[in-house]
Amino acid sequence: MNAAAKHSDRYTIEDIYNLPDGERAELIDGELYMMAAPGTNHQRLVKEFTYLIEDYIRHNNGDCEVFPAPFAVFLNANNEIYLEPDISVICDKNKLTDDGCKGAPDWIIEIVSLSSRAMDYNKKLLKYGTAGVREYWIIDSMKQLILVYNFEHDTFEQYSFSDKVKAGIYENFEIDFAGINIE
């Protein structure tokens, strides 16, 4: 987005909607953050985790829905924060509209890439934690690290890619990272 396209000192949701075809960005408090196209390994991980979560929900008659990116998440009512998490799990169907999710998803997973590192570890962590997201996972395949923030219980845990990681929003669901093919 160039400066000429900026209508004021702050970007708005309209700037997101007016991006050229093929360009994606996230909006946080009037700042626009352009998104690079994800790599192949990143997309493999999104596909794998989406499948595992969806499979668990289906086999346990769960009410939640899983949405991989690109999927719009409007964290607040005034559209000041527009994000596209890699994976969003939403249990409150009233938050779902044709535009995406209006309000905080229950569980968000971000797969770290070189271009998203600062956003995932800092800006998004703060926004998700204050918006009402119950659980936030940062999966960093480059560091072989999984960070689990359970905002509902105010806990933080760190795991490696040889661990089984339990999802806090479900009683009996865990992901065995040793069984995930990470390249």
Image (tube, grey):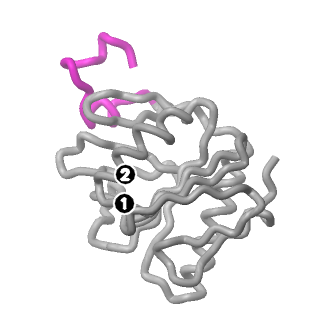
Residue drawn at 23 percent across, 24 percent down: 10
* Quadrant holding the N terminus: top left
Q: Specify the amino acid type for callout 1.
A: Val
Specify whether 119 is left or right of 96.
right
Q: Is residue 93 magenta?
A: no
Q: Position of residue 113 (x, y in %)?
A: 62, 37
> What x and y, as percent, mark residue 64?
44, 75
User: According to the image, label 2 marks what residue?
Assistant: 128
Taking 127 as reference, is 173 left or right? right
For the stretch drawn in magenta, what is the main secondary structure?
loop
Residue count near mark 2 (Cα–Cα under 10 Å), binned few <14, some 14–19, many ≥20: many
Residue 61 or residue 159, whichever sits in front: 159
User: Which amino acid is tagged 2?
Assistant: Tyr
- Segment colored magenta: 1-20
* Residue 108 seen in the figure: no
**Location of residue 131 by image quarter:** bottom left
Q: Nearer the viewer, residue 129 or 104?
A: 129
Name the residue at 74% across, 57% down.
161
Q: Nearer the viewer, residue 101 or 163?
A: 163
Could one spot residue 34 in this view of the protein? yes
In the rendered view, would you say 177 is above or below 77?
Answer: below
Q: Secondary structure at mark 1?
A: loop
User: Circle 1 sits on which residue?
Assistant: 133
Q: Position of residue 116 (x, y in %)?
A: 54, 35
User: Regarding mark 2 in the picture, which secondary structure is present there?
Assistant: helix
Indicate which disc, 1 or 2, sits on the residue closer to the N terminus: 2
Pointers 1 and 2 in contact (CB under 8 A)? yes
Q: Which mark is residue 157?
A: none
Residue 74: image location, x then y, percent: 30, 50
Note whether 73 is above or below 175 in the view shown: above
